[in-house]
Amino acid sequence: MSEKNKLRVAMVEPIGGHSGNDFYDFGLCKAVADQGTELSFYTCDETDLDTKFNFPFRTRKPFKNIYGKDHKLIRGFRYAIGAWNAAQDAARAGAKVVHFHVYHFAGREYLNFFLFRRKGFKVVATIHDIESFDKYGQEIDPGKYGKFRRAIDQIIVHSDYAKASLKKYFPDFPEAAIHIVPHGDSDFLYNTPISREDARKKLNLPMDQQLVLFFGQIKKVKGLDVLLKAHAIVRDQMPDVKLLVVGKPWKVEQEEFDAIVKEKNLEKDCILNYSYVPNEIIPYYFAAADVVTLPYREIYSSGVMIRSLDYSAAIVASDLDTFKKIIVEGENGVMFKNEDEQDLAEKIMALLKDEAKMKRLRINAKKTADEKFSWQLIGKKVNEIYKLALNGSSN
């Protein structure tokens, strides 16, 4: 393709390394760039993967000091400056399409849309969370979605469930302009096999006990409370099993989970690591675990699920529609009744007692990741969506 006709795209995702989104961001950007697209990625200054690896795209960090304890008005002002600088730089780079990632439908997110629209960009948006999960269980005002709907040319979601949920808030958005593109796998950087023994040595975890892992950002919707109650049942019947929790609470109080631990006398039966884990350490946790649990109450897509598949985990997940599209019962995972701690406990115990089944699940999990969630396939699909946006198709 000639330089004149080359597809140029701006990718804007301000969370980046602040909350573990960078692995997904860089995987997607690389997949797009590998298709021959000239891509510029705009994110926050807490992102550092670009300093550790070489990537075939530009990385810029205009969103500076937008997180932390400073007053939200100050951080909001910094965000606005970052959005302005990103739009200016993308225009100078000759990009014609901007790709946003939406986790909240709020004012500062809309500012990005507004600034890029003013410069004539076509807009593609991956909508990760239709309703922000910090509002789980609350009534949502659908009226605020209209201005976003009018600013978007093409929409990407990660699952059928997300697409169906989106229709509630974008009822008149053209069906042909909503695309289901899966979340990509995790092996494009840290893919060296790690033994269970080496992983546990690295993390200083017990060698002589079975470990059940809960990994990822902790939100009310993620069901950690259900898992803790289930683990109390597991502990009573299999006292050598430990629950390993690794993740940082978000819009939920750590004390809520500590209270359950205390109530159920789980202090000696859990390893609680309420913190952010660097990307290079994450594979060790999955390698160390015997079983990985996803006890989510609701989810539109799950990077943790894809990671679990990619890291060959023996998965126990809630029977959500999103997961039913991925998990084949007894082949690449096991499912339990959503929010039922007794059923969850029974599924965990049965799996821990069946080494042959765990081995089969791990093999098939990796196969699922490679066949359904490869970045190469995703890169091709996303580039086609950019072309639809440029051509003004369907919206």
Image (tube, rainbow, N blue to C red):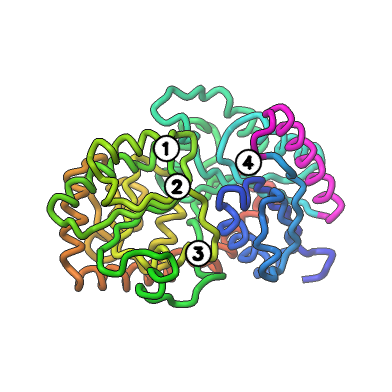
Q: Is residue 354 above or below residue 230?
A: below
The span from disc 2 to disc 3 (Cα, nearest Å) is 15 Å
Left or right of 391, for residue 278: left
Amino acid at pointer 4: Asn
Name the spot of residue 289 as percent of width and height, x first. Answer: 33, 64
* Residue matched to label 1: 254
The secondary element bearing badge 2 is classed as loop
Instruction: Check residue 281 in the rendering and tell me which mark sits there, or answer none.
Output: 3
Q: Where does the image place residue 241, in percent across and percent down from the top left?
A: 23, 58
In front: mark 1 or mark 4? 1
Q: CA distance from mark 1 to mark 4?
A: 44 Å
Say if mark 2 contacts mark 4, CB within 8 Å. Answer: no
Residue that mark 4 sits on:
395
Which residues are drawn in magenta? 67-94
Q: Earlier in the sequence, mark 3 or mark 1?
A: 1
| Residue ranking furthest to the right | 92
**Figure check: 163 above or below 307:** above
Residue type at mark 3: give it. Ile
1 or 2: tag closer to the N-terminus: 1
Residue at 31% x, 70% y: name it: 362
> Is the residue marked by circle 4 packed among few (<14), some (14-19), or many (20+) residues within 10 Å?
some
Location of residue 331 in the rendering, given as x and y in whole percent from the top left corner:
25, 66
Q: CA distance from mark 2 to mark 4?
A: 44 Å
Q: Residues within 10 Å of mark 2 (few under 14, many from 20)?
A: some
Residue count near mark 1 (Cα–Cα under 10 Å), binned few <14, some 14–19, many ≥20? few
Tag nearer the camera, 4 or 3: 3
Label 1 amino acid? Gln
Q: Which disc number belongs to residue 274?
A: 2
